[in-house]
Image (spheres, rainbow, N blue to C red):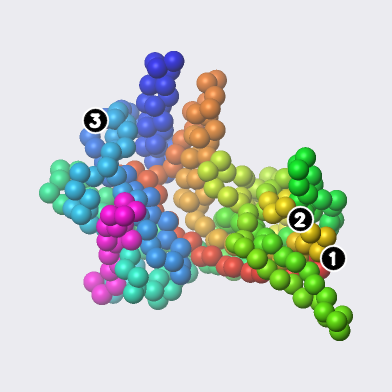
Amino acid sequence: MKQLSFILLLTFFAILTGCVNRIDITDEEESKIFVTCEMVRGDRVVAYVSTSNNLNGSNSILFPEDAQINIFPKGIGVTENILELLYDKEHNYYISAPHIPTNDFLFPGRTYVLEARINNSVIKQIYSKAQLPVGNTIDTIIVVENEIPYNDGINDFWQGTLNIKLSEPSILNQENYFHFLLNDIMTTETIDSEGQLFFDHEGEPQNLELIRVNKGVFAVTELAHKDGFFVKYSDLIDGQLEVVLRSSIPITEENQVTKHIISHLMSISEDYYEYHIGKSNIIEISETVFSEPALLRSNIEQGIGLFSGSIQTNQTIHLDY
């Protein structure tokens, strides 16, 4: 069993160094910088950095403060628009300063460059570039069927079939990818003495579980390590998908309802899409023995990992049923 685990470990790190065009890289002892930096417009930029090679796995940087990570827009006032990521010891990652709003730094359609090095180290500096996608929205969400609550043997949970239509992307001459998260929140329906309807919300939003895809099945991919699901727009018909969703909030009162869906629609890059599908595949095959190897995409030159950007559009949608 130990020998098998060792073989799987080697396989994982050989997979990890697959490059963008998905070719295999031979085992090598040279250490490289391993970075994942997923920029979201409106949020502080965070990067996770370590060193890695095919043979010994991932290692923490001995002196994390020696890592220098800069992001800047390509070709537009580069020297005046550098976003430096600083080491956060508490969380062991690198993050942009709180006083720098990324809404004023990250813009749809613009290309950004990441450069990272470890000072006083022989490990090569890495380089990557990523284009921020253009955001998108949901046109409509229609309740096709409000089903009988699902019972897990203890509690009832709302379950329903929704038809979701995405807006047509503004750029149609390139592939469009989305990371879709749908939440609900505990809602109590009350009627006052004058017959007016009110909704009271309590607690934090909870992820809606995807039970089944009725329309757009070839466009949707679920992930082993992330909530929500990915959507490849070109595989939809008229931008529509029909899904069966289930709430994770138990129905404990007669007037408790699911009437509001909180949608987080992230426009993502192809690199982000392929990287996380590969990572999900690796997690799934790690639980089996008789499987084909999966490849993890990397867009980091002289290193390993992912640099990407995304635009997130949040909407709260009232379900009319």
Mark 3: secondary structure: loop
Disc 2 target residue = 252
- Residue closer to the observer: 196 or 269: 196
Residue 87 is situated, as x and y percent measured from the top left of the image, at: 27, 57
Q: Is residue 190 above or below residue 229?
A: below
Residue situated in front as seen by the camera: 260 or 142 = 260
Place of residue 90 in the rendered image (x, y in percent of width and height, measured from the top left): 31, 55
Q: Is the residue 1 above or below the residue 264 in the image?
A: above
Q: Nearer the viewer, residue 62 or 23?
A: 62
Residue bounds of the magenta highlight: 79-95
What residue would you read off at disc 1?
A: 321
Q: Is residue 110 visible?
A: no
Decide which of tag 3 and tag 2 comes sooner along the chain: 3
**Residue type pointed to by label 1:** Tyr
Picture quadrant of residue 178: bottom right
Q: Which quarter of the picture shows residue 113?
A: bottom left
Which residue corresponds to the image point at 81% horizontal and 64% vertical from the top-left? 255
The quarter of the rendered structure image containing the C terminus is bottom right
Instruction: Please rate how many residues cluster around mark 1, counting C-alpha atoms within 10 Å: few if below 14, some from 14 to 19, many from 20.
Output: few
Give the secondary structure at mark 1. Answer: loop
Q: CA distance from mark 3 to mark 2?
A: 58 Å
Cα separation, mark 2 vs mark 1, equals 20 Å
Please give the residue where the numbered disc 3 appears in the rendered image: 29
Question: Is 57 part of what is drawn in magenta?
Answer: no
- Please tell me how crowded label 3 is: few (under 14), some (14-19), or many (20+) other residues with Cα within 10 Å: few
**Label 1 to label 3: alpha-carbon separation:** 61 Å
Please tell me how crowded label 2 is: few (under 14), some (14-19), or many (20+) other residues with Cα within 10 Å: few
Residue drawn at (77%, 62%) of the image? 256
Element marked by disc 2: loop
Q: Earlier in the sequence, mark 1 or mark 3?
A: 3
**Image check: 65 left or right of 296?**
left
Q: Residue at x 57, y 67 (%)?
A: 313
